[in-house]
Each structure stands twice: as structure tokens, then as C-alpha cells.
Image: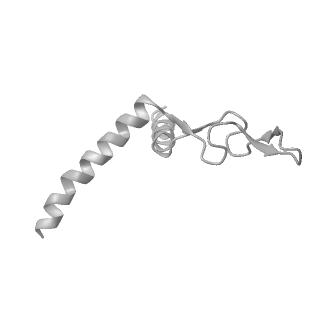
Amino acid sequence: MPSLFTAMPLLILLTLCYAVLCAASPFGVCRKCDGWGHKIWQTRTGRLKRGRDCRRCRGYGRRLRIGRRLYNTASHMRHDGTR
């Protein structure tokens, strides 16, 4: 069981760091379009062309982090429950 006692502080530290990251920067780069907001296509002549807006981020290039989404859901549930 010594590995459990050494792993728990590490997991707690990682969780706190992720919580601070979600509080400081709630939006991350969209993984589908790499933050561009759209795909870039190459034509037959070699020229680059802007494609359609990304469906995942709706053209913004940013997405809400999972931790921030969980926090928003919990705070909305608490707000609705204490009315």
C-alpha cells in the first residue's frame, strides 16, 4: 500500500492545477480545426482556400474545457436548487 499513499497527493495536486487552469483560462484551442475556426483546403493549383466553419467550435476556434463545463453545470444546478 505505500504506492497508494504516494499517488494520492500527486492526484490531488494534478486536480488542483487543472482547477486553477480552468478558472484562469476556461477556453482551450479546438482540437478539430487547431484553433483556426475553419479547415484550410489546398486546390489543384496549390493555392490555399478557406473552407467551411468548424462544426465543433462553430467557427470560433475555441472550446469550453471539460472542467469548466462541469463547474458551470454544478453552479447552475446549485442556483436552481436554492431558489
Q: Residue at x 70, y 37 (%)?
A: 37
Image height of 69 relative to 83, above or below: below
Looking at this view, name the residue that lies furthest to the top.
24
Q: Is residue 48 left or right of residue 66?
A: right
Q: Residue at x 20, y 56 (%)?
A: 8
Between 63 and 31, which is closer to the camera in this rendering? 31
Q: Residue at x 43, y 36 (%)?
A: 22
Image height of 24 relative to 67, above or below: above
Q: Is residue 52 left or right of residue 29?
A: right
Q: Give percent across and percent down for residue 36.
A: 67, 36
Q: Is residue 47 left or right of residue 78?
A: right
Residue 23 appears in which quarter of the rendering? top left
Q: Give percent across and percent down for residue 39.
A: 75, 43
Looking at this view, name the residue that lies furthest to the front.
45
Q: Residue at x 74, y 45 (%)?
A: 55
Looking at this view, name the residue that lies furthest to the right.
44
Between 69 and 13, which is closer to the camera in this rendering? 13
Q: Give percent across and percent down for residue 26.
A: 49, 33
Image height of 16 relative to 79, above or below: below
Looking at this view, name the residue that lies furthest to the left.
2
Q: Is residue 11 left or right of residue 30?
A: left
Residue 17 appears in which quarter of the rendering? top left
Q: Quadrant of the N terminus?
A: bottom left
Between 67 and 40, which is closer to the camera in this rendering? 40
